[in-house]
Image (cartoon, helix red, strand yellow):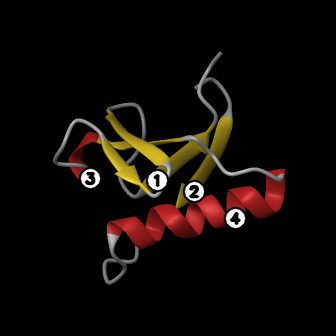
Amino acid sequence: MDIGMLWLDDDKRRPFEEKVNRAADYYREKYGSLPELCLVNSSMLAEEKKKVGHIEVQPTKNVLPNHFWLGMRAS
């Protein structure tokens, strides 16, 4: 993913899946389609990859904790 939307959610009471879904809902409202990919800081995800609904969530060191980088896979 080269281009995407960065979303911050540092609410400790909100579950991880809800954070991804809220960010995806906002992305859909703003850009008219649902994102395919969400990159998060490695510390936020115990597994190598995870699915939240249809969105693939991947850990990376390039995204700050509590941030969600959503977008489409690079073609």
Judged from the image, the secondary structure of the residue bearing numbered disc 1 is strand
Q: First in sequence: mark 2 or mark 3?
A: 2
**Mark closer to the observer (3, 4):** 4
Q: Which residue is mark 2?
A: 7
Residue 68 placement, left or right of 32: left
Label for residue 44?
3
Q: Nearer the viewer, mark 1 or mark 4?
A: 4
> Picture coordinates of residue 60 (x, y %)?
34, 33
Q: At which x and y percent is residue 62?
A: 40, 31
Quarter in which the C terminus is drawn: top right
Instruction: Residue at 32% x, 32% y: name it.
Output: 61
**Mark nearer the N terminus (3 vs 4):** 4
Q: Residues within 10 Å of mark 2 (few under 14, many from 20)?
A: some
Residue at 54% x, 44% y: name it. 69
Structural distance between the alpha carbons of marks 2 and 4:
9 Å
State yes or no: discs 2 and 4 in contact (Cβ < 8 Å): yes
Q: Which residue is mark 1?
A: 67
Residue 2: image tag: none
Q: Which residue is mark 4?
A: 26
Q: Which residue is nearer to you in this view: 40 or 73?
A: 73
Question: What distance separates the C-alpha of mark 1 from that of mark 2?
Answer: 5 Å
**Which amino acid lies under the numbered mark 3 shown in the image of this protein?**
Met
What residue sits 69% from the left and 65% below the top?
26
What residue appears at the point 68 percent right and 51 percent down from the top-left corner? 34
Quadrant in which the N terminus appears = top right
